[in-house]
Amino acid sequence: MIAGGRPLRGEVRISGAKNAALPILCASLLSAQALVLDNLPELKDVDTLVRLLQGMGVHAERQPGGIHLACPDLHTPVAAYELVKTMRASILVLGPLLARCGQARVSLPGGCAIGERPVDLHIKGLEAMGARISIEHGYIVAQVDRLRGARIFMDTITVTGTENLMMAATLADGITLLENAAREPEVIDLAECLIAMGARIKGHGTDLITIEGVPALHAARHRVMPDRIESGTFLVAAAATQGDVTLRNTCPDALLAVLDKLYEANASIDRNGDSLRIRMRGPNLGVSVRTAPHPAFPTDMQAQFMAMNCVAEGTTVITETIFENRFMHVQELRRLGANIEIEGNTAIIRGVPGLEGADVMATDLRASASLVIAGLIAQGETRIERIYHLDRGYEHIEAKLMGLGADIRRVAAPAIG
């Protein structure tokens, strides 16, 4: 429940990145020795993946702000549907399992209903490295004696595909070239963790990554990067509410496309090391965006900017090029009084003087964040249902918003019947 109309003010600490933590957790499968992670966010998706890894033989011991992982005996190379169905990132165990023990049985993944995210590029890449793969009863079944280096060109840019193949290649025989690779900061963070474990990787952060396989990886310690999407969400929330917020432990260099658009929308942004302070210079001017792979504007920030644009001056246009179903939040924003039209993969937003609180329903992780921002803007009370989506990707979001002056709280769902 959110009682809106209050500008956000104060400081907030940004947590570790969900989209970096998940593949890095999977990297623990690659070594019999310990992997210690710091700055690990407390998220539902992290908990789910840790349980999945434990079922395979990973020993996991939570520590304050982190986790100690060790997998001396990878005894069950199976990712069952019961856990995989809740998160698509589970596919990231496929490459490490094949590389470490030569076999894997991984359920086809589930997760947010934001559009097709096929795993065919993962499969084609592993097949190029010598794996024998079939789909049986909803599972990817894979075997190989030992993966071998290969030159792999990915038809489309895929973050999880790049991460899966990069992890697999660390223990392959020979050199692997990943062409048209994803350049996201989370890919770079995974590569840095793998390098700390003894992998030989070059070119991460570019569209050509070179991995020279080694016989084994060793123990390492790694700090998960700050979450650029959580950072962007709080920046937009501050701008949309005409607030004054300072973010600590953030990652300004990974946020350049978002910061440019906020500046265009009339925000003043001051950087001091890993901190960012945002204030509005005047009225919210809104901003048109087009999503594309990094370093362009991230699809994971599209919904949040749409919420801000709902009360901006004039008309803005948002074009979504990554996921075909990522406008499901539009009908919920309309319930709050937003004026939005959809034409194919484009949303046309005509700013209105204000939004009014209403009951709305979250459809996916980032859509839920957009509804929170809209609720913070709206006059009156907004009740958001299905907030379990938020818990998948935002650590203690209501507590952090309360610390910035928001009137927000969790309430029990009303009884039915």
Image: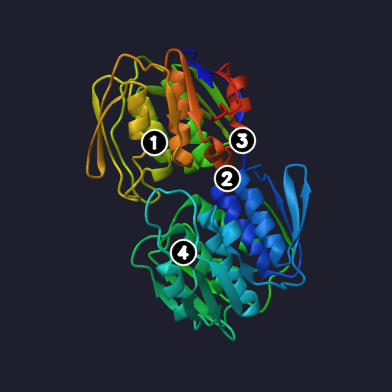
Quarter holding the C terminus is: top right
Lower sequence index among marks 2 and 1? 2
In the image shown, does 183 or 400 lie closer to the viewer? 400
Q: Which residue is mark 4?
A: 161
Quarter holding the N terminus is: top right
Whole-angstrom CA distance, mark 2 to mark 3, is 11 Å
- In this rendering, which labeled residue sits more in front, label 1 or label 3? 1
At label 2, which amino acid type do we have?
A: Ala
At label 1, which amino acid type do we have?
A: Ala
Residue depicted at 47% across the width and 33% down the height? 369
Q: Secondary structure at mark 3?
A: loop
Residue depicted at 51% across the width and 80% down the height? 149
- In this rendering, which labeled residue sits more in front, label 2 or label 3? 2
Would you call the spot at circle 1 few (<14 residues within 10 Å), some (14-19), or many (20 or more)? many
Q: Which residue is mark 2?
A: 17
Tag 2 near tag 1, CB within 8 Å:
no
